[in-house]
Image (cartoon, rainbow, N blue to C red):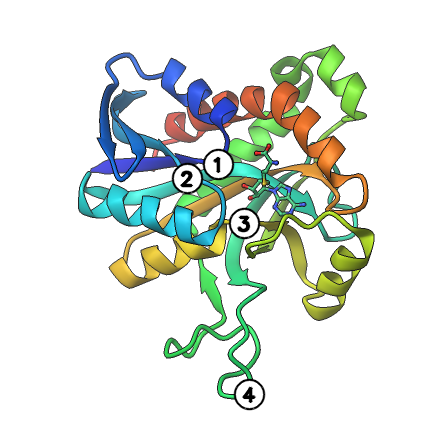
């Protein structure tokens, strides 16, 4: 069984590659796929690219060319839900494209011809990911180090599970995040790829789990918070999460 590990950021992918003893690079469609093992598990690791089309293409190639039978997505996201703070971890139970709108022909947010707007992640993989996330959060002092925690004001990160929304927009104004909160009150976090990968997995009948670390609050400060967070925090989280996820038996 090959697991695809799809990472959103360079910092995260390089952290994953550091854990693979035998990775071999294959280039397809301008992407570098890294085939090998991680914790005894056959893995293909790859950068998703940014945005829904890039991520859907990457996921499709991981499945069709590299035989991925399960997909694990890790990345950062903007926090939307009340109490979803920078440094928190969010495991998706379902994903929705917030910029999908074929109304009035189809209801707002519905994927045309699917009859669905929300796609569910795999329950077993997500439970395992939630367990890994809780273990990382409980151990944040060691995983992140005191400098990073102080710089980002991360005391004890919380772990959330629920709806993550995706769209081809970096949400970086308070007005826009307020509008998304009004429209989709149960959305915990906003990012740019997850729901697209979920659609690809849905089409192939393959299981998916998605974890996002909150890098910003999708507000006027988002661009500053995002860059600093990716540089200083995302990498440590990803290493710990992937290692712990694989250590928990399926
Ligand atoms: N200028 C950035 C662009 C990254 S886009 C760069 O230096 O690369 C932001 C990425 O992080 C996307 O992959 C998205 O999934 C996630 N993300 C983090 N915060 C987000 C937010 N507030 N809105 C949308 N996506 C966000």
Name the foreground residue: 55 vs 40: 55
Which residue is drawn at the image coordinates 26% and 22% (left, top)? 37
Circle 1 crowding by C-alpha within 10 Å: few under 14, some 14–19, many from 20: many
Which residue position holds label 4?
A: 104
Which percent across, then down, holds residue 135? Answer: 57, 28
Which residue position holds label 1?
A: 8
Left or right of 205, for residue 226: right
Mark 4 vs mark 3, CA separation in Å:
24 Å
Left or right of 125, for residue 152: right
Which residue is drawn at the image coordinates 42% and 79% (left, top)? 115
Is there any visible trace of residue 97 in the rendered image?
yes
Mark 3 vs mark 1, CA separation in Å:
9 Å
Provide the secondary structure element on which disc 4 rests.
Answer: loop
When the figure is inspected, residue 175 is found, relative to residue 141, above or below; the finding is below
Which residue is drawn at the image coordinates 74% and 12% (left, top)? 146
Mark found first going from the N terminus, 2 or 4: 2
Mark 2 vs mark 4, CA separation in Å:
32 Å
Q: State yes or no: Cβ of the residue under disc 2 lies below 8 Å from any atom of ligand 1.
A: yes
Name the foreground residue: 205 vs 203: 203
Provide the secondary structure element on which disc 2 rests.
Answer: loop
Mark 2 vs mark 3, CA separation in Å:
10 Å
Identify the disc placed on residue 48: 2
Identify the disc placed on residue 192: 3
Q: State yes or no: Cβ of the residue under disc 1 lies below 8 Å from any atom of ligand 1.
A: yes
When the figure is inspected, residue 171 is found, relative to residue 75, above or below; the finding is below
């Amino acid at each position: 069984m090959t697991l695809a590990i799809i990472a959103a950021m360079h910092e995260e992918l390089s952290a994953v590659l550091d854990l693979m003893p035998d990775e071999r690079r294959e280039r397809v469609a301008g992407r570098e796929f890294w085939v090998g093992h991680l914790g005894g598990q056959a893995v293909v690791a790859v950068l998703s690219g940014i945005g829904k089309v890039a991520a859907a293409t990457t996921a499709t190639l991981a499945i069709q060319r590299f035989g991925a039978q399960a997909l694990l997505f890790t990345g950062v996201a903007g926090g939307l839900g009340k109490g979803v703070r920078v440094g928190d971890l969010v495991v998706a139970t379902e994903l929705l494209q917030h910029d999908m709108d074929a109304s009035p022909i189809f209801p707002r947010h519905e994927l045309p011809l699917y009859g669905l707007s929300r796609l569910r992640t795999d329950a077993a993989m997500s439970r395992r990911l939630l367990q890994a996330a809780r273990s990382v959060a409980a151990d944040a002092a060691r995983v992140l180090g005191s400098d990073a925690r102080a710089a980002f004001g991360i005391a004890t990160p919380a772990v959330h599970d629920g709806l993550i929304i995706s769209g081809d927009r970096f949400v970086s104004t308070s007005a826009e995040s307020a509008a998304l909160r009004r429209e989709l009150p149960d959305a915990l976090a906003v990012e740019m790829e997850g729901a697209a990968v979920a659609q690809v997995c849905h089409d192939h009948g393959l299981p998916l789990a998605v974890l996002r670390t909150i890098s910003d609050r999708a507000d006027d400060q988002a661009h500053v918070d995002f860059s600093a967070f990716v540089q200083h925090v995302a990498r440590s989280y990803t290493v710990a999460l992937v290692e712990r996820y694989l250590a928990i038996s399926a």
